[in-house]
Amino acid sequence: MSVGAIAVAPGRVGAPRHLGIAGLILAVVAWVITLPPMLVRTAVPSAIIGVLAMLAGAIAFVGDERRLGSGAIGLGLLAIAGATGNTNSSVAHLKVVFTWSILVAAMLRYATPLLLAALGGIISERSGVINIGLEGMMLMGAFFGIWGADVLHSWVLGCLVAIASGALLALVHAWFSIHLRANQVVSGTGINFLALGITGYFFIADYGSNGTPSGISQVPGVKLPLIQHVGFFGGAIGNANLLTWIALLLVPALTVFLFRTRWGLRLRAVGEKPRAADTVGLPVLRTRYFAVVASGMLAALGGAYLSDAFVGSFNQNMTEGRGFIALAAVIFGKWRPVGALIAVLLFGFASALGDRLPTFSQSAATLFQALPYVLTLIAVAGVVGRSRAPASVGIPYVKE
Amino acid sequence: MADSTRPALEPRASTRPALELRGITKKFGSVVANDRVDFDVYPGEVHALLGENGAGKSTLVSVLYGLYTPNEGEIVVDGRPVEIDSPATAIRLGIGMVHQHFMLVPVMTVAENLVLGHEPTRSGGLLDLKAARARVREISERYGLAVDPDATIEDVTVGTQQRVEILRALYRGARILVLDEPTAVLTAQEVQELMDVLQRLKQDGTGIVFISHKLGEVLQVADRITVLRHGRKIDTVRREGATEQSLARLVVGREVLLTVEKSQAHAAEPMLVVEHLHVRDDRDLEAVDDVSLSVRAGEIVAIAGVDGNGQQELVEAITGLRAPAEGRIVVDGHDITRKGVSAATDAAVAHIPEDRHRRGLVLPFTLAENLALREFRRPELSARGWLRTGRIRSRATALLREYDVRGGGPDAYASSLSGGNQQKVAIAREIASDPKLLVAHQPTRGLDVGAIEFVHRRLIEERDRGRAILLVSLEYEEVRSLADRILVIYEGRIMGEFAPDASEEELGMAMTGRQAAAAG
């Protein structure tokens, strides 16, 4: 099943759906042609393509692909508006903002911690445990990652310490939600506050008001010898962080694990219908423990990236809700690794763009920071539609 | 020794039981669910476990499948005493289980469900789904159980899901197959197919434990029948010589009237008149096609037919749950067409729904609350927006006594009752509203003989009090013993009207549409 079954209504893989997707692509094209390097300076071609996109969307809509169709129509409108805006602004500004290689590199940087946490969230939720505590587990990783690297003088050990701290916190969540059968949302929320307290305390105790020192061993970038100096690719991925590559590689790895191995099949069965798994002799509770702990490890690694690779220092509550964005990415991605990847890339791109847009208007800088959230909201509501969670997520399992 | 090879074609009367339960006692607190029960099954034999709901059948099976640990007693498999502490152990010992509520993962395919927990893998732990599919085909061909390995469970019929459960047990090497109320959810056609499958398994040397409370099918399928009552084994009898009457006596512990006595109906003025009704189902297909009928006060009119021929939609239209596309529904002179449930309620229509869990009761509510659900707006039960909980309770207490509901008082949760008692609560609430028209949709579904008797008697009594009763049922016997007139429905059309003494052949013909459409 797996890949072929992604979100396709049974027996309805046909023209309307393809038209809807074509509409979405056309809309993006309409916008992109007014940007560097193409830089079309009149909005007319964009308008034509945008109208085509909307037309395709409309046909898809009529053909019962309502969400995709309306998504294409909406995106077409946005693209025409955006393209008009682009043609009215100066080429210099456009070139500063839309330096694609830099945008892509920034997108990956923003996406990495989210991706790691989201993959963790997928594992946990696929096993039937909601992990609101991703945020707290990331924060633990963020602090203990850089603390470990500082004290042990090694980013490798730092990452391991981070993973251990995330696992430990996840174990608390697992104990509450699996063993004590507490409400998983409440438990997860408690975990977040607990992490805030723990990291805040040790941060002040160890580093006081000076913050983490400079010169801590950091997770290095991976210099790709062949393409490091090749134009776009060199800038975009020629020197991406090691953890970024690990996160990206984890996407296919987790996909294979979930949908192509016996362990994945069992994990999903536990999340869908634990009683069924139990009656064929599978250890439901143990599986869930494993999944929650694994999710804590991944989230913490994402946190470690944040402090020990992205920023290079720790400050209190530095995750700032990224765990929740990761959770949104899990849902946006329909509990599939590739889906989550698309979600975090979209979010990362919007963040990267939001960083550079103040070129146009300094005063609107704060407004631009809302862009990722707005885009995510539109994408979730407009295009993705309702997604189906694992049937038993959030429900503690009671053995007969 | 015996667990390595599967006896291919062993003669039926094997000398040693494949499975023996000796003196099993299982207590829950002070409640004794099983009291020194002995049970055994031989290879190539069907041994039925018969008893009312709550007699201890499910407990015994849970002990057998490793879900409960017995307080006393011994389990012997192939002559060796064993300890079954988990389903995994049971599976290893060759015990397969077909659960009443299927233990399948709805979003996964047939093949994935079949191999779950016992997956064929290639190197590195990768699932070998090709091998899984091949195994499905192999076993399904061997036993004549056709299934598509790539179909998703939630898309296939209940009958097919049950096949998958059986296949899974066989895939895991089951030599003893336990079926817990296997026919409860099946259509008549599917029941027949299941019986055929069991015959083939029997010939292949599988020992089958068949749990049921339906006397007829037990007599049809079983070689021996063990009856449980109140947790005790009452008797084990051979099928030869047993009758429905003799079994019912063992099950209930007293003489049971399998057919209700009823006097001539005194039908008065028409209470329900349905004219040229057309109703569409959830998929927007025509489910009820130009149905006209009437039910008079003081008579029972039965709608007979195979499940899924528009009964559901017809009942929903009459009770206001579904707006009909065309036609008219008049109750006691009031047109309630397309006016919703409250109009139907105001016109004194009561509804005993088919699914008491989904529609009849609110399971997490207490019995008192459930009994007040329909009439809590009346001044006796609420005033100025406040519920009069004292009166609600005392009214509930009276109703529970009147309807002989056992298993809990007014403060017990509906979910804690057995199916029969739940149904009594649903019926009590509906009849207590003093309806003019009572729509009873499969009122005895899933009930045991004792409870069925109660419901049947009650319906006749209500008829004699002058209520109009529309009974929708899939059971021949029920329809023929209760109804004053029988309307057969097929593909949403009324095929004709029959007297209660119509032969099974006549009714059967009409129910399968093999009759000129003599629209009613």
Image: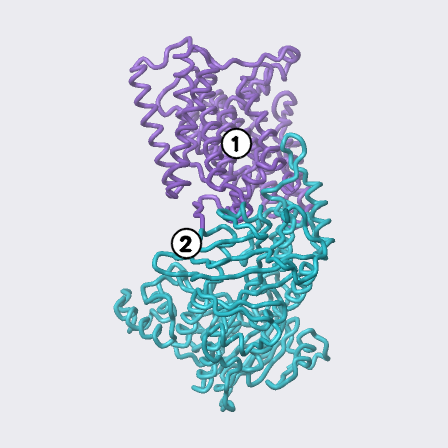
**Label 1, on which residue?**
A119
Tell which of B62 and A320 is nearer to you. B62
**Label 2, on which residue?**
B71
Q: Residue at x 48, y 47 (%)?
A: B85
Do the numbered discs 1 and 2 sit on residues whose CB atoms are within 8 Å?
Answer: no
The quarter of the image holding the C terminus of chain B is bottom right
Disc 2 element: loop
Palette colour of chain A: purple
Residue B47 sits in quarter = bottom right
Could you tell whether B135 is left or right of B55 in the image?
A: right
Instruction: Output the letter for the chain in cyan.
Output: B
Tell which of A277 and B380 is nearer to you. A277
Residue B500 in picture, x, y percent from top left = 59, 85
Is residue A9 in view from this perspective?
Answer: no
Is residue A161 in view from this perspective?
Answer: yes
* Image label count: 2
Could you tell whether B336 is left or right of A61 in the image?
A: left
Task: Report the Cα–Cα distance between label 1 and label 2.
Answer: 46 Å
The circle on residue B30 is none
Residue A99 in picture, x, y percent from top left = 58, 19
